[in-house]
């Protein structure tokens, strides 16, 4: 009998995670992985935060039984997450309008959200920024959404194209879901100012568009509350419904724990209960219920005054170091005859849309062992003071052609 899989097609590797596979197979000592969005410390390691280590030690001592978590996750975790997103005293929380579900990373949150909205909204259409995170289109496409895009970035100026964005959002049909990055836009690093957020939110309200906020980097640009500005503004805007996908991969350096959350804002507590029942059904038919360890770590930190303060401090150190790496890269590039990269310092978060073309990115990999996403996105947070010089030299070299 022929194999059932005989005609299965080989599809290309993932544009981001596939790079890590290629990087791992590279034997050059000078190699640098600026592909995937991971923060590395000066020693080139993914940090294990001290606040997390303390909870981990306490958990190991207790050696608690591992029963199943509720379908929508650990209550201590989901409550703390909600408070981080909206602020502890949010009226929306007090009114029982916000429900949070523990998910398998931020990607899992997007997928759960996509499933919910495909089932409950009349129009299966979502608008994502051009460009956006490589996986957004795939996640929403996988549940049957029609994915369209809106103007976001001006490649010539390396800045947000706000007029273009407003014009495109203004043309969307009522009921379209609009995916917005709360901060540290992936891949461009170009964010909206508070004034621009107000204008976008007013437009969403006026045109009855459905906001879907993706916040994978809370605390990586300015701070916990500052980076949640879009969510806080939406909460007080009068818009009755919106959703948030959030993640602790970056802010807690817990990438492999796959720990994220999906939060839905409903019109009232009763509606919230009904929506939550739908989410639980979706999850039960998918992975049944989430894993314990990552949630226990995050809950342990966020629910302790002392550990929370320590975490904020460690997060602040990562943030400050990324800003310094940006400045260092720009300075070194200028010194090597490439002052045109000054815009990198204006961008926020882990990434920079370097403006390098695909052939230039290929040269970086082939000649220097430096891995970047084909679109020219580089992860600034993966640099170190040791690799800065080498990377700047290589980028300046390929940029000349
Ligand atoms: C990235 O954009 O590199 C990260 O969010 C990791 C991922 O899953 O792609």
Image: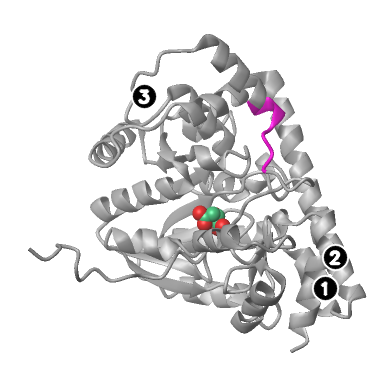
User: Where's the N terminus, which quadrant?
Assistant: bottom left
Q: Name the residue beneath numbered marker 3.
A: 69
Q: Which residues are magenta?
A: 46-52
Mark 3 is surrounded, within 10 Å at the Cα level, by few (under 14), some (14 to 19) or many (20 or more) other residues, namely some
Kindly state the secondary structure of the residue where label 3 is placed: loop
Disc 3 under 8 Å from ligand 1? The reply is no
Near-viewer residue (378 or 29):
29
Residue in view at x 65 percent, y 25 percent:
53
Disc nearest the viewer among 3 and 1: 1
Residue under label 1, please give it: 393
Residue drawn at point x = 58 percent, y = 29 percent = 89
**Magenta-colored stretch includes residue 47:** yes
Image quadrant of residue 249?
top right
Percent x, y for residue 211? Answer: 45, 55
Q: Which residue is mark 2?
A: 389
Relative image position of residue 340 (x, y in whole percent): 81, 79
Separation (CA) of disc 3 from disc 2: 48 Å
Dot placed on the residue nearer the N-terminal end, 3 or 1? 3
Q: Is residue 120 above or below residue 390?
A: above
């Amino acid at each position: 009998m022929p194999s059932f899989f005989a005609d299965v097609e080989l599809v290309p590797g993932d544009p981001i995670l596939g790079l890590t596979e290629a990087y791992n197979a590279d034997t050059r000592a000078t190699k640098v992985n600026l592909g995937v969005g991971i923060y590395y410390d000066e020693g080139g390691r993914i940090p294990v935060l001290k606040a997390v280590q303390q909870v981990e030690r306490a958990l190991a001592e207790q050696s608690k039984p591992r029963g199943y978590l509720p379908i929508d996750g650990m209550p201590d975790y989901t409550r703390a997450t909600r408070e981080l997103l909206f602020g502890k005293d949010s009226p929306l929380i007090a009114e029982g309008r916000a429900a949070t579900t523990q998910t398998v990373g931020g990607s899992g949150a997007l997928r759960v959200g996509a499933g919910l909205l495909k089932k409950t909204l009349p129009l299966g259409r979502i608008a994502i920024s051009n460009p956006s995170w490589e996986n957004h289109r795939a996640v929403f496409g996988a549940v049957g959404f029609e994915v369209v895009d809106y103007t976001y970035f001006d490649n010539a100026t390396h800045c947000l194209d706000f007029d273009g964005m407003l014009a495109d959002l203004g043309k969307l049909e009522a009921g379209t879901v609009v995916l917005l990055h709360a901060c540290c836009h992936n891949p461009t690093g170009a964010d909206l100012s508070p004034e621009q957020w107000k204008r976008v939110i007013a437009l969403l309200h006026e045109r009855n568009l459905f906001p879907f906020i993706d916040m994978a980097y809370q605390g990586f640009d300015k701070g916990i509350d500052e980076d949640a500005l879009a969510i806080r503004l939406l909460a007080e805007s009068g818009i009755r419904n919106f959703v948030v996908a959030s993640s602790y991969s970056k802010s807690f350096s817990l990438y492999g724990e796959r720990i994220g959350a999906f939060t839905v804002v409903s019109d009232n507590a009763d509606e919230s209960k009904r929506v939550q029942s739908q989410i639980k059904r979706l999850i039960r038919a998918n992975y049944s219920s989430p894993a314990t360890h990552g949630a226990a770590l995050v809950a342990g930190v966020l629910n302790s005054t002392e550990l929370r303060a320590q975490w904020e401090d460690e997060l602040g150190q990562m943030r400050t170091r990324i800003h310094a790496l940006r400045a260092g890269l720009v300075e070194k590039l200028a010194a090597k005859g490439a002052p045109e990269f000054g815009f990198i310092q204006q961008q926020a978060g882990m990434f920079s849309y370097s403006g390098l073309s695909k052939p230039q990115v290929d040269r970086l990999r082939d000649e220097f062992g430096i891995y970047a996403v084909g679109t020219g996105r580089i992860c600034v947070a993966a640099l170190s003071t040791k690799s800065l010089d080498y990377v700047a030299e290589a980028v300046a070299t390929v940029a000349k052609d």
